[in-house]
């Protein structure tokens, strides 16, 4: 098990190495550890309500999980209240670990959060389901589910 300082340092190394415009990036396993060690941290799931209903969601400590859609279903329309809703679940200095299906929307959400003054916005690498495998299936090559972290299905 890593220390909290090591986890934040690794996220910061990724920020520097990849020139990320937000606080950094964490792997699913690092995110799970970080959430256990830093009870002030929030896992903010930016997937649509439909994705939560059809696919499932992570299971973590009480009060540490929040759902704030980046885009809305159907149609992928941007959520104009994203930042306002994010402010309801986290303050600008709260560590927020942003999660989506495969770590595309979460990067955009981390940029927007940072630009809005969130100083500790992190992208959760690999996402909840990860990328597709050769047969077009998810949850088989990467992501929160593939890594064996706790989640509840739809």
Image (cartoon, grey):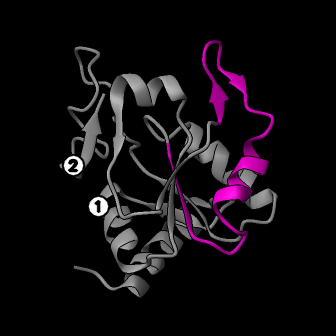
Indicate left or right for 7 with 66 as reference. left
Asked if residue 85 is among those painted magenta in the image, a careful observer would answer yes
Q: Where is residue 23 in the image (x, y as percent from the top left)?
A: 62, 67
Q: Can residue 131 be seen in this view?
A: no
Q: Nearer the viewer, residue 40 or 138?
A: 40
Above or below, 147 relative to 140: below
Q: Which of 96 and 14 is in front in this view?
A: 96
- Counting residues from the start of the chain, the first of labels 1 and 2 encountered is 1
Indicate left or right for 125 with 151 as reference. right
- Label 1 and label 2: CA atoms lie apart by 7 Å
Q: Residue 147 carries which label?
A: 2
Q: Specify start and end residues of the magenta stretch as a single range.
A: 70-99
Give the structural element (helix, strand or loop) at label 1.
Answer: helix
Above or below, 131 relative to 58: above
Q: Which mark is residue 29?
A: 1
Residues marked 1 and 2 touching at CB (< 8 Å): yes
């Amino acid at each position: 098990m890593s220390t909290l300082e090591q986890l934040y340092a690794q996220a910061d190394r990724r920020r520097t190495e990849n020139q990320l415009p937000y606080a950094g990036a964490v792997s699913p396993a690092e995110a799970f550890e970080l959430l256990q060690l830093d009870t002030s941290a929030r896992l903010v799931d930016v997937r649509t309500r439909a994705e939560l209903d059809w696919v499932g969601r992570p299971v973590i400590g009480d009060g540490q999980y929040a759902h704030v859609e980046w885009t809305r279903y159907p149609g992928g329309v941007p959520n104009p209240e994203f930042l306002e809703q994010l402010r309801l679940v986290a303050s600008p200095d709260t560590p927020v670990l942003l999660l989506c299906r495969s770590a595309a929307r979460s990067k955009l959400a981390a940029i927007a959060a940072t630009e809005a003054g969130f100083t500790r916005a992190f992208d959760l690498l690999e996402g909840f389901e990860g990328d597709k495998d050769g047969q077009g299936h998810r949850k088989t090559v990467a992501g929160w589910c593939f890594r064996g972290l706790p989640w509840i299905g739809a």
